[in-house]
Amino acid sequence: MPKTRNQMQETCLKIQILSQEGYSCHQIARKCRCSPSAVGYTLQKYKRTNSLEDKPRSGRPRVSSARNDHILIHMCRENLPMTSQELQQQWSNQIGVQCSTRTVCGRLLDHGLRSYKAAKKPLINERQRLARRRWAQAHKNWTNWTARNWKKIWWSDESSFQLYPPPDNVRVHKRPGKALSPACTVPTVKHGRGSIMVWGCMSAAGHIPLCVSGQLYTY
């Protein structure tokens, strides 16, 4: 198993201490379980730099500048469902620098934009959204209801089975806490060029049989 950075630094420190105690390179190598050449290199490095720390390395220069990164983030926010491959192609064409999709993902992660599966929500307009909010605020005290109150409630819902359902693999780049933002969701409708509607209802007393429309709705 290769040694970690901390283990290597501990070995170098041990080599330096044993050398000060008068041990030879071969004796130090046996005690530290390394080669005599590694012991000699470590001691020479300490004499030359008076330190056992590695010098900072410059590394590979960044492909993009801070301005180019800002362009990428702006492109992603303008169209959150864009894939990394699409962003990479458009970004490379705009800044004139070839880069990989891994670079694009790294830049997005640096700005807190991760790839998530888009949530599916019904397609509603602003008026319907405000009406739902007013209804929820008017009934926010339901936690004080008793079991007798809840027995008076009937729960009903409907759903449709579509011949052409919406795609299930849409992903968006977003920050945590933005899952239900309109730009991060896939709108769903009760038709898909052909669908059958199913309606059901239940209460504390039981449920009724499902009502299936025998008509095929086409659009």
Image: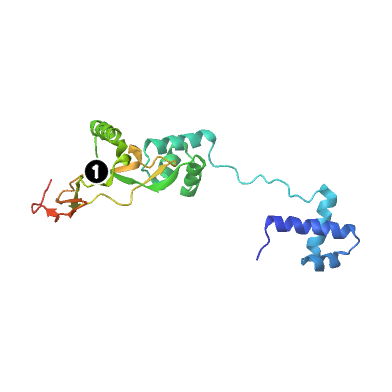
Q: Is residue 76 above or below residue 171?
A: above
At x 83%, y 49%, the residue is: 48
Locate residue 46 relative to residue 115 in the image: left or right.
right
Instruction: Please tell me which residue lies in front, 65 or 169.
Output: 169
- Position of residue 7 in the picture relative to residue 211 (left or right): right
Does the rendering let one see residue 163? Answer: no
Is there any visible trace of residue 118 in the rendered image? yes
Tell me the residue that label 1 is attached to. 149
x, y percent for residue 197: 15, 50
Q: Which amino acid type is shown beneath numbered disc 1?
A: Asn
Residue at 81 percent of width and 69 percent of height: 30
Q: Residue furthest left?
A: 215
- Quarter where residue 7 is shown: bottom right
- Badge 1: residue crowd in 10 Å (few <14, some 14–19, many ≥20): few
Q: Position of residue 168 (x, y in %)?
A: 30, 52
**View extreme (bottom): residue:** 30
The secondary element bearing badge 1 is classed as helix
**The quadrant where residue 35 appears:** bottom right
Which residue is outermost to the right?
Answer: 22
Task: Name the side, left or right, on which 29 lies relative to 135.
Answer: right
Note whether 83 is above or below 73 in the view shown.
below
Residue at x-position 75% and y-position 49%: 53
